[in-house]
Image: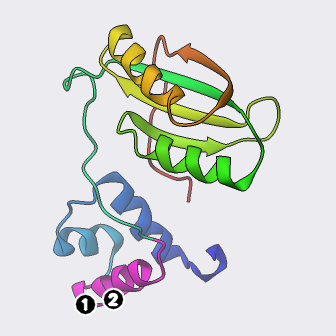
Amino acid sequence: MTDILDPMDRRLLRELQTDASLSLADLAERVGLSQSPCWKRVKRLEAQGIIERRVALLDREQLDLGLVVFVSVRAGRHDQLWLDQFTKEASALPEVVEFYRMSGETDYLLKVVVRDIAAYDRFYKRLIATAALGDVTSAFGLEQIKYTTALPI
């Protein structure tokens, strides 16, 4: 897919990753295009699914969501029914902000954002009720060193 992106597309995407609220006029000026070609490129990138959506990034500390927990899960079983149930139920938990199926010792890795340890305990009890889990290990983030949603394009 990336071979269809020319340098102008990449410039547009970098600018939008930095600030998706830019007006079309400002975006066009920043990348050196007139508004109409800029708009057409953005619409094409959206139609191709390269731009999935535009969102607001929130400051979790100001929202009293200061605890980040990385939860490693080993599957209780390895069959499609278990997988479907677990992924559906765990994905529906609003505290789960990222969810990956992994290779290696851990089958699934969840990034969970909660207020504090008590909130995590309540989350944990809901998580283990989703499916028969083999093992659950939690690692608490002590300090966020880097956080970005910008992809290296």
The quarter of the rendered structure image containing the N terminus is: bottom right
The answer to the question of whether label 2 and label 1 lie on touching residues, with beta carbons closer than 8 A, is yes
Q: Secondary structure at mark 1?
A: helix
Report, in whole angstroms, how far the alpha carbon at label 2 lies from the one at label 1.
6 Å
In the image, which residues are magenta?
34-50
Q: Residue at x 65, y 29 (%)?
A: 133
Question: Hey, what amino acid is under mark 2?
Answer: Lys
Task: Identify the amino acid type marked 1.
Answer: Ser
> Does 32 sit above or below residue 145?
below
Residue 138 on image: x %, y %: 57, 17
Secondary structure that dominates the magenta span = helix
Asked which secondary structure carries label 2, the reply is helix
Looking at the image, how many numbered discs can be counted on the residues? 2
Q: Judge left or right: residue 118 versus residue 50.
A: left
Asked whether 146 or 110 is in front, the reply is 110
User: How did the renderer colour the structure?
Assistant: rainbow
Residue at figure coordinates x 75%, y 39% from the top left: 77
Q: Residues within 10 Å of mark 1 (few under 14, many from 20)?
A: few
Kindly identify the residue that appears in the image at 55 percent across and 34 percent down. 110
**On screen, residue 9 above or below 91:** below
Residue 145 numbered mark, or none: none
Q: Is residue 151 left or right of residue 22?
A: right
Number of the label disc, if any, that sits on residue 40: 2
Q: Is residue 80 above or below residue 46?
A: above
Q: Which residue is mark 1?
A: 36
